[in-house]
Image (cartoon, rainbow, N blue to C red):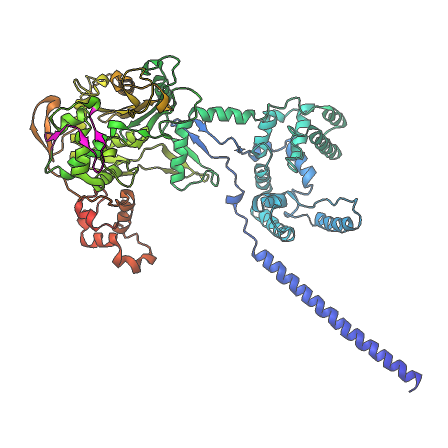
Amino acid sequence: MTTKTKEKKVLKRVGTFFKWFSLLCLTVMVIGITGGVYYLHKVIKETPKVDAQYLDTHGTSKILDADGNIIWQPTDRRMENTTYDEMKDSLYVNGLIATEDKTFWTNPGVDYTQIAKMIIGVARETVDKSYNARGGSTLSQQLIKNVYYNGGIGYNTKVRKIQEIFLAQQLDENFTKEQILTYYVNNLQFAEGAQGIKTIMKTYFNKSFSDYKDRSAASIAEQAYLIGLGQAPTTYNLYENVEAATERKDIVLGVLLKESLITQEEYDSAKKYDLTTNLQPRYWESENQRLQNLKYKVYTDEVLDEVTSMGYNINDATLTIKSFLHQDTFDAITQKVREDKYYQDGVGGTEQVGVTVMDNNGIVVGIVGSRFENDELNRATQQTRSSGSSTKPFTAYGPLLQYKGDSYNTASLFDTSAYQYPGSNAIMYNFGRYTYGMQSLQYSLRMSLNTPVGRIADNLLGSGRMKAFLHGVGLDVKDQYSSVDAIGLNISSLQLAAAYNTLNNGGVYTKPRFVDKIQFTDGSEKTIEPTRHRAMNESTAFVLSQILRGTVHAPYTAKVGAIPQYDGYAGKTGSVAFDENTNAPATYGAGGSDIWFASMTNKGYTVTVWQGYDEPNSSPQLTDGLGTQQVLGRDLQLMMNGNTTIENWSQPSNVKNLGGSGIEVQYAITDSQDIGSSTGVTVPSIEGYNDLFSKVKSNNVIDKWEDSLTSNSFYKIYKNQPSIVDDTTIIGKELYDVLPN
């Protein structure tokens, strides 16, 4: 083979190699481009859409009183919006653009020149470790990062950057530069629990944009600091690191000088300015808000609970909650309750109190949870104590009239001798171990006798009837009930007020109300309608109110709380005796640990008062006979209603007069309906049933229910016995028998 032939073969092999190599490179390039395009498509496809609802900031949730004054705001996070008009042409805005995004007014949301420089810088940084690559993000990109990507924390950087570029351009297409800039400064997350530039200005320096219109050294230096703070709020926190904050201020001043936003003279004076000169005391704003929050905490805690129960989260949504609270009324009630004359231990004592004042519509107008200011324990709602006799209308006499009114009336006689608890050697006595012979139902309740109640609970009602009735008035606190519970339940003043308000409203229970309206960020609002259900017959409520109307007259137990000019006024005391083995000092005479007084005025107010000590077993005994809780309840009724005429409750047609006159009239109920008795009966939720009834009746039944409707109890009731399905339905026997346990 000649040399020439060999050369040809070599050239052929080289040519073949390059051909295949080129083909391979082309293939790799195509695959790379295809993979890149696919990757970009996937990343962009998963990118969220720009939406104003995510960009808008409307501040923190707050609670207003009835007159629109703020009475609560969170102290751990504060936010106040600024508008573009407030900040336009300010040194802060012009300096922010000069420092962070010089092409802001002209770029399409992304500065590609800066992105190219950033890529080159990153490449250089990998070779030269001393080199620090600068970011190329515009204000639009930073806004996207802050709002959609939690400041970049927890996200894949490469994916995030690609999506940021895409979203920043979308942002620029859909919003004006003025809007973008406003969104940016309002979404800045600063230290000290502050969001938005307006909030941080106030936090650090107690200033606003209007205070920065001058060209003083303080004005320029503070604005320069605020411009630089946004990049690293924790690092440059003036409270934590004055040196780093000052260095950052000086860097920004250099940019302002370079961009001719300030003069050399202004630069020099601002550079010398001490940033701490006008620095506010740390957390001063939070502390002021904390003190304000504390003043009405007993009320706003209930407001927040009510809002939460509706499914709203004040941390996830910005809500303006308008409450029913009138500060003048609330303050007057609080001041009255805290007068030393209403307490058995007088001036300097430690006796405590829990008071609820509720109007006829279930609106709570006053709560006092402590005798002393700045005591954060709310004994009216957060504490439960034994109610003593104050709940007897609901544990025994009410259900007896409601379910067995065809056999028993107010004149029915009951044995008042000592009563032995079933299955026990324990004996129930009346106060002082007195026996009164056979006494009427009316007299027994007015004199607050124990033993008739024990006999009624165990022998005539049973657990099921007691539970059903107590559930209706919001006092269902146990699974099983007996004579032990009939003479006292562990409840709060608020619960007791709602129960007595049921009597005051003809047997209709209203869930305690604190919230009037909720206003949302889009300007819409929701008026909160009362949650009500019928808990007992109107006849039952009337007869109970008439019995208790007599209780506030001599010789009965609540005579100290009498208001003679009020015809439509009723009340009931309660006291809790110490166990015989308790060695508490009997400072005020033989008595117990807790004393109560519940009262109501027709179309007026329900007032419940609890008095006692936080440590009952080691504290002085209180005596119901002194009537301090009655005097307080009476005076609150007088303060709320004034010296006026209050008519008696109207007698329903289903109530029959049996004789007597004045407060001694005897009554019988003609529309009672028994539900049957059985210990261990599971009583369903009235509210839940009423809700489902409403859905069935309005045909608001979702599709997925259709297959199971034939076996649905509510559906059967509606189809077969529609007459008993009503918003005012009581748990009567007919309904009770067909409802599931």
Q: Which residues are magenta?
A: 409-430
Residue 417: in magenta span? yes
In the rendered image, residue 158, in percent from the top left (x then y), is placed at 65, 53
Name the residue at the front extreme.
425
**Is residue 367 among the parts visible in the rendering?**
yes
Q: Residue at x 26, y 40 (%)?
A: 480
Q: Which residue sits furthest right?
A: 3
Q: Where's the N terminus, which quadrant?
A: bottom right
Identify whether 640 is placed above or below 79.
Answer: above
Rendered location of residue 40, percent (x, y): 62, 58
Residue 208 appears in view: no
The residue drawn where x is 52% and y is 41% is 56
Residue lying furthest bottom in this view?
Answer: 1
Decide if residue 12 is on the left or right side of residue 258. Answer: right
Q: Position of residue 642 (x, y in %)?
A: 26, 18
- Residue 126 image position (x, y, % from top left): 77, 50
Is 686 situated left or right of 265 in this image?
left
Left or right, 3 with respect to 698, comes to right
Residue in front for this viewpoint, 227 or 323: 323
Name which quarter of the figure residue 645 lies in.
Answer: top left
In the image, residue 117 sits, relative to residue 378, either above or below, namely: below
Identified at 32% across, 37% down, the residue is 529
For residue 171, above or below residue 407: below
Front-lying residue, 55 or 87: 55
